[in-house]
Structures are given as C-alpha cells and as structure tokens.
Image: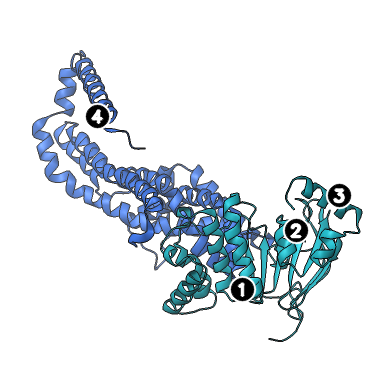
Chain colours: A blue, B cyan
Amino acid sequence: MRTHGASGSRSTLIALASTVVFALVVVLVVSNSPGWPEVQRQFFNGEFFRESLRVIPKAFLLNVRIFLIAEVFILVFALFIAILRSLPGPVFFPLRALAIVYTDFFRGVPTILVIYLLGFGAPALQISGIPRDELFWGVVALVLVYSAYVSEVYRAGIESVHPSQEAAARSLGLSQAKTLRYVIVPQAVRRVVPPLLNDFIGLQKDTALVALLGPVEAFRQSQIEVASNFNYTPYLVTAILFVLLTIPLARLTDWLVIRDRRRQLALGAAR
Amino acid sequence: MSAETVLAIEGLQKSFDVEVLKGISLTLEPSEVVCLIGASGSGKSTLLRCVNLLEPIQAGRIEFLGEEITAPGVDVDHVRRRIGIVFQAFNLFPHMSVLKNITLGLTKVLKTPQAQADQEAADLLARFGLADKRSEYPDRLSGGQQQRVAIVRALAMRPELMLLDEVTSALDPELVAEVLDVIRGLATSGMTMLIATHEMSFARDIANRVCFLHDGVILEEGPPAEIFSAPTNERTQQFLQRIIEAGRL
C-alpha cells in the first residue's frame, strides 16, 4: 500500500532514527564488553580483512556456480515431483507414493548427512560411467535435498489453484497434461515465487556444506586462511559475501511480487 | 446440419455421498433451447457437469450426436471440445489476457495457428462488443464482461451444444441483461443450449422447453407457456409460487 507524502516521510524518519539508536546501543554494548579488544583483534583485523578479500571472493565464485547449477535442476526436478504427487486417481498411486517417500526422506535427513553419504559413498561404488568428482556429488546432494522442500512449495501452489480452473480448462477439451501446463502450473508458480526464492536463499548458504567433500569454495578457503594466520577475520569476509549474495535475491523477490500485482492492476491497453 | 438428436440422456444417476440425480431422462433436438429450473440443490448444475463429463456418473447413459459419450473408452477431451460450458463463476484464466483465454483452446486443442486463432477470437470479441477488451486481464473486467468473455471462449471452439450453468447468478443485477442478451443472440443463431437458470422470465422468453427439477428428478417438463402458466405438478406450483412471491416472475 502506498502511504501519502507527509505521513510517509514521517514514518521513514522514525524508522531511520530508531535504527540509528538501536545500532548505537549494540555498538556500545559490544565495544564495552571485557573481551572486546581480543575479539576485535581476532575477528576484525583490517590487514587480514584486505588479504582475505584477495582470495576468498575467487573461491566464492564456486559457491555461486554450485548455487546456479543446483537451482536450475531443483526448479525442474521439484516441479516434476510436485506434479507426480498431484496426479489424481488410483492408477497413479505408486507414483504418488514414490513422491511422498522421496520428500519425506530428503526433508528428514540432515543435509550434511546426505552430502557425506553421496559424496563419499557414490564414488566409492566405483561404477564405471558415474562421475567420481566430489563437486558433482555435492551438487547432486543439494539438488536432492532442496528439491524435496521446493516440491512442497510447488505443491502448495498447485493445490491453491481452485478446482474450477481445472474444470474450465478441461471443458475446452484440454488434456490433463495441457491443463497442468497452461492453466494450473503457471498460476501455481506465480503464487509461490516468494517462498520459492526463500528456499533458494537457504540453498545459497548450504553451498558451503559442499566444502566438507573437499572442493575449495569460500568457506573452505576461509578455513585455510584462518588456519594459516591464526585469525578469524576471513570468516567475517565470507559471511559478508554470503549476505551480499542473498540481498539481490531478497530484493528480486520483493520486485516480482510488486510487478505481479502491478501487472494485474495495469491497464492492458499498453500491451 | 443433420437433424440428428443433439443430446439424449437416459436414466442418468449421479451420487456424491448422497444421490443427487435419480434417473434423469432428457433429449435436445438441434437448435432447441431447454431451460432447467428448480431450487438450488435440485441437481441442475450437476446435470450439466455430467453432460460435459466433468463428473463421472453411476448409472444411465448420455448420447451426444448419436455417440454414447458415457461409454467406457470414450475420448473425453474430444467430447468436451464439442460441448461448450459456461460456469456461474466465469472461471476465466486470471493469468491470461482476454485474447489468450479465448485462443488457448483453439491453439492447444484444435491446433489452429496462433495468427488465425487471434483473428477468430478478435472477430468473436467484436461480435459481442468486447473488441476493446482483448488485451485486458480478466480482473480488470466487470462481471458481465467476464461472463461474456467466458461465453466467447466456449463459442470459439465451435461447440455443437452449449451448457450454461446459472451464468447470471454471480452478477450484479444491472449486469444481468447484457449477458442474457448474448444468450438470446445465440438462441436466435440456432445454437442448441441446455440452460440451468434462476431467471424465470428469461426462461419463459427463450426456452422451447422448460424442465422443473426437484430433488434429482425432472418432475415436470413442457413448453414454457404451460409450465409457467398452468403447472400440473404440485411441487412445480409451490416453486413458482415462491418465485412469484419473491417478485422474480
């Protein structure tokens, strides 16, 4: 909702003032704590900060790559699972059951375990033809875990589309599949974009777990830096990088929601 | 046009948890307009949904242009595209423009090329006074306009039978006329229609035949003049009496 000029700028002022006061209080409390000088030396060292900035962002690119690749597969695979689970009728019971078992399992097992099991287990099988690369299995693990979450998001979206939409589409002679593709799924996806992106923010952070298999991404790189300098500042740098990565996604979520609302309100005449 | 019976329903029974239709038999000849009247819950909507195969039936049979469409193994999509249905709540696709709403069936079911589908849809919209709405999204339209678009969407598939399910019940009173006018136009053009309606004076004007449904059974059936002026069944009399008392006839 738009607020009107005067009251709008007034509430902005209040928000600004309260933020500044709050930040000041936090800074004062922290910087006056007995251990602060030591913590400052260990975590906020300017020299190590600059040094980390030279190495960690490069490693962070690997996190971005893992994230982007996993995201594409999750979007497709999770939709597939969600559709399996939405199939009506007794004939499709086995497929529905399979989808349920899948989501239950991968939502239940801690991500870190899936990464370990796949990352160390799958290559150990030594089946010819399947990749032995840890990075590959790390991505697979993330895709499997996050697809379970995202498929539930999709499913909520699919179920939120009123049955009358399906009736309308089927009455035109559209098949079940075409009804899903052109009528149900587009509406479902639109509705779930914000929770979907929320899951992706979780995924961005969990790319750090792939480090456990060996690949040197940002977290692993910062561990190396920490170990060689006996200073924790590299962790801070990594944390900042992760936050910087999530901010665009959070704003994109907001923007999509606003755009969708505006599109619905906009005069179609412009089109 | 052949003079083949368009729709023949025989002993149709449908139950959800309770029995909703208890043996309905009804036929529609080409260009015939039949109105179903009766209280809410009498089974009018269910009957229409059964004819469009949106609901499986428990007993009886439905023939459409000589083909038994309730037989096992019938291609339901093929049947549905030849029978148009318009719903009480319009059921337009909110994520599509008016034009897209109409061309979806043409392009994805009838495989009409997009350009030709657009042209056909535009022509139909113009015919129903909606030419300037082609790029609008449904939520920008009034209820009456939405319902007219829904009718156009069904018509675009060139159906051989139209089912109208209380198409004016969700409309503000001042918007009812524009939709009824469209339906009158369809009747004049010779469209075969099965109409569930609460608009009694409309039914009296437009119908060749009126069926009074009560509790899942057609209790009385005949020309509107007979049904509305001299109903013989006691329940029909009571129903019409209540309508008259409500000032709706």
Residue topped by disc 1: B81
> CA–CA distance between discs 4 and 2?
57 Å
Q: Earlier in the sequence, mark 3 or mark 2?
A: 2
- Residue B140 visible? The answer is yes
Residue at 47%, 76% in the rendered image:
B117
Q: Nearer the viewer, mark 3 or mark 4?
A: 3
Q: Secondary structure at mark 2?
A: helix
Outermost residue on the left side: it is A47
Q: Few, some or many C-alpha atoms within 10 Å of disc 1 (few <14, some 14-19, many ≥20)?
A: many
**Marks 4 & 2 on one chain:** no
Q: Few, some or many C-alpha atoms within 10 Å of disc 4 (few <14, some 14-19, many ≥20)?
A: few
| Horizontal side, residue A123 vs residue B123: left or right | left
Picture disc at residue B238:
3
State which quadrant residue A48 falls in. Answer: top left
Outermost residue on the bottom side: it is B2
* Residue in the foreground of this view, choosing between A216 and B229: B229
Residue topped by disc 4: A9
Q: Earlier in the sequence, mark 3 or mark 1?
A: 1
Q: Secondary structure at mark 3?
A: helix
Q: Earlier in the sequence, mark 1 or mark 2?
A: 2
| Chain identity of mark 3 | B
- Disc 2 residue type (three-letter): Lys
